[in-house]
Amino acid sequence: MANTELRLFRYFEALCEEQNFSRAAERLAITPPTLTHQIQKLEKGLNVRLLIRKTKMKIQLTEAGARFLESARDVLQRADQAEKTARKAARGEIGRLEIGYMISTAYSGLLQRLIGNFQKTYPAIDIALRQFSTVNLIDAILSNEVDAGFARVPNQYPSGLSGFPVYRSPVILAPRYAAGQHHGADRARI
């Protein structure tokens, strides 16, 4: 039965844990006859007897039932993990980011600091770094070649692109002084 529904796996697991149709049905928020019918459907689909009814209320697993329960739990665990993974990916907690950068951001230490802080917060996101010139980086972002980039502020943002400052670098003018010149006088002339 290749198309066994996960719901039937859950029903079977609950029945095995409760060892009682009434308690398992209550836990699953279904009626005992519905649970009985679903377990019979599972057995019929597998063409295997999974349990023996010891009394009207008590059950015992067959060898096939015990083996099936073990595998069913594994399948349910994997299905739950797949759901969690999908939700995390949808929230942006896992995945991959392609980040473009200019070489000056790498030299400044900015890139390492920002990426390091990001990865502490989101350790399940893989980051791939690619070096670009400013013009090529903007083109790469616009063409979805990279998800984001660190670049100089353009004179004008192209349509579909925006940005915000993450680092400001102080720029100084350092003139060369001739021997014996007074530094204050040179500054005043600049």
Image (cartoon, rainbow, N blue to C red):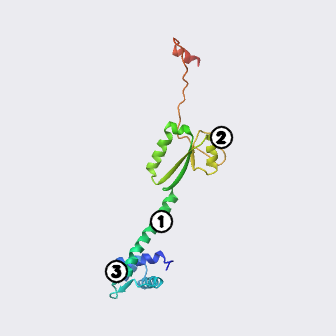
Q: Residues within 10 Å of mark 2 (few under 14, many from 20)?
A: few
Going from the N terminus, do you reach mark 1 or mark 3 first? 3
Give the alpha-carbon distance from disc 3 to disc 2, as whole Å.
Answer: 70 Å
Q: Position of residue 104 (x, y in %)?
A: 55, 37
Q: Which residue is mark 3?
A: 19
Q: Residues within 10 Å of mark 1 (few under 14, many from 20)?
A: few
In the rendered image, the residue lying farthest to the top is: 180
Q: Is residue 3 left or right of residue 140?
A: left
Amino acid under label 3?
Gln
Amino acid under label 2?
Gln
Q: Position of residue 41 (x, y in %)?
A: 46, 84
| Of marks 3 and 2, the one in the foreground | 3
Q: Residues within 10 Å of mark 3 (few under 14, many from 20)?
A: some
In the rendered image, the residue lying farthest to the bottom is: 56
Q: Which residue is mark 2?
A: 156
Amino acid under label 1?
Ala
Q: Which residue is mark 1?
A: 82
Give the alpha-carbon distance from disc 2 to disc 1, as whole Å.
Answer: 43 Å
| Of marks 1 and 3, the one in the foreground | 1
Residue drawn at the location 64% of the way across and 50% of the way down: 143
